[in-house]
Image (cartoon, coloured by chain):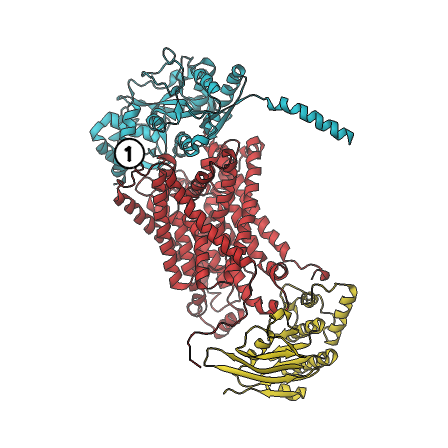
């Protein structure tokens, strides 16, 4: 018998119709993204768009600036999130610090404009800190605008995401290991090196990639805190080319540049340590008491770190709260425009959340059954939407559809579609890790018991996946609720979402109403998020005997 | 069963009557124009009285956004009229070929500080750009553009990006008309005083109201809003001796307008009293036509010179001047 | 009669295993040997999770080789994680039954008596996390009993339990086998198991 080095793959494979469906979806996603960008070339002539005569040195400067700013933001977020995560975890037993991270997560899902105005409410020249300084005899705070402000905001709006992941990874370390650590009296540093770091480092490339992408495509934040044209990103240039110069081919080209850079970074990081982004959902494991927990120095250190982080990350939320909790809330709640926008926003948020979650589930389920190459394509297809801006997507799809569908009908469809696509990467990453784990754990058992396809999903997978599903849906709904990109292109008084109404209110000298509306929007975001997360618990409950 | 049948028959008879509703005139405008507090509602009422039609304003996010939207929609656009572009966008808009002649006579009907003749665009209001400040907080108010540029660096001002906001572009043109070739040096001297450059007018104005700056680039008519609505006269505009740059807002009808006859009627209506009389205290600008100007406007600054470049000159030089601004500021 | 003839499987064309065995109804065959010798592979082949290079698996003359795992008349009890964590014990049993079987009160009565036989009385509504390891394995046995498939595969199912618990499980196992007339393959690395059961053994050696 000839000796052949290739291992014969004779293992029984689980599969189902969801695999080809998943593959079609992944392919579709890639095609839509590319089609949308290419569609921009259809409008306006290439010659007039000055693509060839453009100062490419300027584009290069902006691209490199965007790159370094994003990289720095991601690394700084990591340097902040890691120690804070460890402190939070250390104290989760006694101080319940793990619950506090929920608050810090709010800035991730809030509309950026609201979050930044909250930030200015704390750090602005007439903000809380400045007033405090002046009362205690100091000088007014200098204006914060510039690269420093951008980095700061990036860190505090993205570190909570990293924090969440690190916390769930720490709580996933099996309790026997913690017990051993306690028995052997390992010091805090030893625990970090032996137990925590091996687990945490697996998540780092994926998290760096995610935060890098988010900061690379940062837009509103740059405009509000950048201070001027020196601090800009490719996204800002794309937006300007698209909306104000109406130079669509230029916007398309810049989009492709952005896409290429992002793709390269994602691929590079994937090579470093296979990007399976760990689940971001809450985990219930409780921490065991360890040696050195009671040391006063340690307690002070942890307290300082946690309090400091909370203050910085949660303060903007509080600022929104204080500014908005006025009589104006009642005025706003009575506006007919508010009622219309409310219904529209909630409808779109729920629909896009359910669509994004369902698609994410199908794709995640299919991904488990594919080889390395297939998995890589899936991850890319989804991550694409972190690198392509919603405005390019919306405009591109609009161009493709404008001859075919009624103009006024396109707008709601586009907003729904783009909201769903923007939420998809998040939903996918939340679900994918857990689903892969579940598949591995259950495959043999289910196959041997003839639990396959939809029946298996309904009876076995769904209850186990419920927390992640709730979180993914909640996150998607929150992101949709706060979105102000495509609606800016297509909104009108007949089709309004809450962020659009907020924007318009702000543009009419009505600052107090706007602040009240911002608070209402925040409260709504929280309620929707909590509803989905608890609704998922309902999925988990066992039903009566006869059901099985 | 018989009842349902008779109901159906009745409905069928009623249908033609329902179908013969008034024709709809669709006007794209910027959102503050169409809001409840803007000119939209009153203008809608007066026009509908004479036209036997249903006037619908579609509020879009900004002046520049309006042009982008109709370009994006192309010939499948449902808009009849576009209202809210300004003269700086006129040449670019004309080049798109999307707009038709309005067929109205403008002579003798306009009250602008400059002469205005165009057979595609009709002006509907105008104003001056100016820096607004809080008179209870700012002591050494610059009395000329040069004084502003050479003011000590602790004077904090907020401006808008010329690429995204019409006042921002207005400031750029203002700077150019005062300094000409030396504009880049003037920008370099102004740069340290600029706290931030915002995307839209409201972003900067709200920051100014929050105390983030001493002066904000806005309109000479902004103080009137505070007097009438907030009841305070502490906000004032700084009058510059070199003169102020003007903004004239215009409207035009589309070639592909679904209701061309109605559209022409509206274009003519713009300079009529029914439209013009609403403008001052809802849009906070001067009316382009011959309408009464309210009492409160007399407290506003009245620039000695009205600075203005022709739309063609703006269109030809805009990108170069913006690039010059960018490099001067970025240092 | 479970008949395995010249069943050959190769891990990478250099490491091949061949199996030959017979197990009659009501009989337990203990498969023993050092680790790495291919005990689990045998069970996987029988259950259908691996495809052999050559050879046959027949049950009462019917060839099982072409059937997917869920169509084979087999129940497997793994070393651990036989139960779904979110389902109660009785639901764990029910979920393993054919969909076509009506969930009647009579069926539930059958399960209850099954639980009694296996000393699991009263644990029906408990979650797997609320019962001991031995009890979990016995719930899996109860499921095997209710499924009534003629072939039972046990992959180190009781190896993680202490000896006393194991003896209890073996007693239950023998009850199940006799009652149902099943043919069972028990993989174990502990030679005491076969001795206690007093059954035939198959020694696997690496060659």
Structural crowding at the residue carrying mark 1, measured as other residues with C-alpha within 10 Å and reported as few (<14), some (14–19) or many (≥20): few
Residue where numbered disc 1 is placed: B319
| Quadrant occupied by the N terminus of chain C | bottom right
Q: Is residue B301 above or below residue C14?
A: above
Residue under the point 60% across and 80% down: C159
Image coordinates of residue A175 in percent, x first then y, are 53, 69
Quadrant in the rendering for residue C123: bottom right
Q: Residue furthest left?
A: B181
Task: Tell me, by letter, which chain the rendering colours yellow.
Answer: C
Q: Is residue A314 above or below residue A201?
A: above
Look at 54% across and 52% down and name the residue there: A357
Q: Is residue C127 above or below residue A491?
A: below
Q: Is residue C157 visible?
A: no
Q: Is residue B276 left or right of residue C192?
A: left
Quarter-wise, where is residue B276 in the image? top left
Shown colour of chain A = red
**Chain identifier, cyan in the render:** B
- Front residue of A76/A427: it is A427
Q: Is residue A300 left or right of residue A349?
A: left
- Tell me if I can see residue A317 in this picture: yes
Parent chain of label 1:
B
Position above or below: C43 against A26 = below
Residue B197: % across, % down: 34, 36
- Secondary structure beneath dot 1 equals helix
Horizontal and vertical percent position of residue B151: 26, 31
């Amino acid at each position: 018998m000839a000796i052949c080095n290739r291992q014969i793959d004779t293992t029984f494979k689980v599969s189902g119709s969801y695999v080809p469906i998943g593959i079609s979806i992944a392919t579709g996603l890639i095609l839509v993204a590319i089609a949308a960008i290419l569609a921009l070339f259809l409008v306006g002539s290439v010659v007039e768009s000055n693509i060839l005569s453009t100062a490419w040195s300027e584009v290069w400067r902006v691209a490199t600036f965007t790159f370094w700013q994003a990289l720095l933001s991601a690394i700084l977020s990591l340097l902040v999130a890691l120690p804070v995560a460890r402190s939070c975890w250390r104290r989760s037993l006694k101080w319940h610090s793990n619950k506090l991270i929920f608050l810090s997560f709010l800035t991730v899902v809030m509309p950026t404009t609201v979050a930044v105005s909250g930030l200015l409410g704390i750090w602005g020249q007439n903000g809380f800190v400045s007033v405090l300084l002046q009362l205690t005899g100091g000088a007014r705070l200098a204006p914060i605008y510039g690269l420093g402000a951008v980095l700061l905001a990036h860190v505090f709006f993205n570190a909570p995401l990293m924090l969440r992941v690190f916390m769930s990874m720490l709580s996933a370390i099996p309790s026997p290991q913690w017990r051993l650590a306690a028995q052997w009296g390992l010091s805090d540093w030893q625990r970090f090196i032996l137990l925590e770091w091996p687990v945490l480092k697996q998540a780092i490339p994926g998290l760096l990639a995610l935060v890098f992408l988010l900061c690379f495509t940062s837009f509103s934040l740059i405009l509000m805190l950048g201070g001027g044209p020196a601090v800009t990103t490719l996204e800002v240039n794309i937006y300007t080319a698209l909306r104000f110069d109406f130079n669509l081919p230029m916007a398309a080209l810049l989009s492709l540049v952005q896409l290429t850079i992002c793709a390269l970074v994602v691929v590079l990081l994937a090579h470093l340590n296979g990007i399976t982004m760990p689940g971001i959902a809450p985990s219930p494991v409780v921490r065991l008491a360890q040696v050195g927990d009671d040391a006063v120095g340690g307690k002070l250190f942890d307290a300082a770190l946690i309090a400091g982080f909370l203050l910085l990350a949660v303060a903007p939320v509080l600022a929104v709260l204080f500014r908005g909790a006025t009589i104006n809330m009642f005025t706003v709640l009575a506006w007919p425009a508010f009622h219309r926008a409310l219904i529209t926003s909630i409808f779109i948020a729920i629909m896009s959340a359910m669509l994004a979650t369902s698609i994410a589930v199908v794709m995640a389920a299919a991904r488990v059954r594919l080889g390395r190459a297939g998995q890589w394509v899936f991850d890319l297809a989804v991550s694409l939407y972190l690198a392509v801006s919603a405005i390019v997507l919306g405009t591109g799809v609009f161009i493709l559809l404008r001859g075919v569908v009624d103009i006024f009908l396109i707008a709601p469809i586009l907003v729904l579609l783009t909201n769903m696509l923007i939420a998809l990467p998040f939903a996918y990453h939340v679900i994918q890790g857990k689903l892969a784990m579940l598949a591995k754990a259950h495959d043999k058992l289910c196959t041997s018991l003839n639990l396959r396809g939809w029946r298996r999903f309904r009876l076995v997978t769904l209850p186990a996946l419920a927390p992640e599903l709730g979180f993914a849906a909640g996150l998607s709904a929150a992101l949709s609720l706060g979105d102000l990109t495509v609606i800016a292109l297509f909104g009108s008084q007949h089709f309004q979402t809450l962020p659009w109404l907020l924007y318009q209110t702000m543009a009419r000298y009505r600052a107090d109403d706007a602040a009240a509306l911002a608070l209402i929007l925040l409260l709504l975001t929280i309620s929707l998020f909590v509803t989905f997360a608890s609704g998922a618990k309902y999925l988990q409950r066992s039903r009566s005997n006869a059901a099985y | 069963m018989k009842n349902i049948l008779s109901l159906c028959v009745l409905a069928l008879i009623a249908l033609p009557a329902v179908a013969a509703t008034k024709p709809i005139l669709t006007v794209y405008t910027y959102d503050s124009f169409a809001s409840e507090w803007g000119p939209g509602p009153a203008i809608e009422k007066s026009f509908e009285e004479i036209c036997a039609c249903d006037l619908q304003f579609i509020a879009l996010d900004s002046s520049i956004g309006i042009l982008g939207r109709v370009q994006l929609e192309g010939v499948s656009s449902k808009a009849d009229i576009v209202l809210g572009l300004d003269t700086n966008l006129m040449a670019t808009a004309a080049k798109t070929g999307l707009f038709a002649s309005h067929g109205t006579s403008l002579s003798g009907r306009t009250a602008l500080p400059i002469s205005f003749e165009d057979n595609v665009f009709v002006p509907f209001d105008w104003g001056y750009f100016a820096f607004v400040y809080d008179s209870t907080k700012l002591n050494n108010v610059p009395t000329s553009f040069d004084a502003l540029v050479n003011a000590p660096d602790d004077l904090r001002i907020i401006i808008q990006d010329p690429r995204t906001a019409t006042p921002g572009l207005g400031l750029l043109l203002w700077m150019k008309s005062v300094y000409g070739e030396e504009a880049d040096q003037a920008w370099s001297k102004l740069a340290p005083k600029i706290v931030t450059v915002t995307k839209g007018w409201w972003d900067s104005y709200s920051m100014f109201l929050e105390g983030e700056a001493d002066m904000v680039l806005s309109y000479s008519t902004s103080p009137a809003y505070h007097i009438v609505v907030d009841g305070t006269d502490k906000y004032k505009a700084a009058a510059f001796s070199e003169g102020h740059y003007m903004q004239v807002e215009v409207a035009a009808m589309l070639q592909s307008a679904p209701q061309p006859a109605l559209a022409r009627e509206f274009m003519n209506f713009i300079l009529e009293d029914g439209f013009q009389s609403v403008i001052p205290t809802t849009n906070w600008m001067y009316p382009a036509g011959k309408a009464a100007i309210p009492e409160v406007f007399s407290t506003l600054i009245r620039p000695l010179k009205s600075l203005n470049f022709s739309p063609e000159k703006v269109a030809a030089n805009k990108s170069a001047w913006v690039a010059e601004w960018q490099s001067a500021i970025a240092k | 009669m479970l008949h395995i003839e010249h069943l050959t499987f190769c891990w990478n064309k250099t490491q091949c295993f061949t199996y030959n065995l017979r197990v009659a109804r009501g009989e337990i065959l203990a498969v023993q040997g050092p680790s790495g010798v291919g005990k689990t592979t045998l069970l996987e082949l029988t259950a259908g999770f691996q495809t052999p290079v050559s050879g046959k698996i027949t049950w009462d003359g019917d060839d099982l080789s072409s059937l997917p795992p869920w169509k084979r008349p087999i129940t497997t009890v793994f070393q651990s994680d036989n139960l779904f964590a979110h389902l109660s014990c009785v639901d764990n049993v029910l979920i393993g039954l054919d969909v076509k079987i009506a969930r009647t009160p009579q069926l539930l009565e059958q399960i209850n008596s099954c639980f009694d036989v296996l000393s699991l009385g009263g644990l029906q509504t408990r979650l797997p996390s609320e019962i001991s390891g031995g009890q979990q394995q016995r719930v899996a046995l109860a499921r095997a009993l209710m499924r009534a498939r003629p072939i039972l595969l046990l992959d180190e199912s009781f190896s993680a339990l202490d000896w006393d618990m194991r003896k209890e499980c073996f007693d239950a196992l023998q009850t199940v086998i006799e009652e149902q007339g099943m043919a069972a393959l028990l993989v174990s690395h502990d030679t005491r198991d076969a001795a206690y059961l007093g059954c035939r053994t198959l020694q696997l050696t690496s060659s």
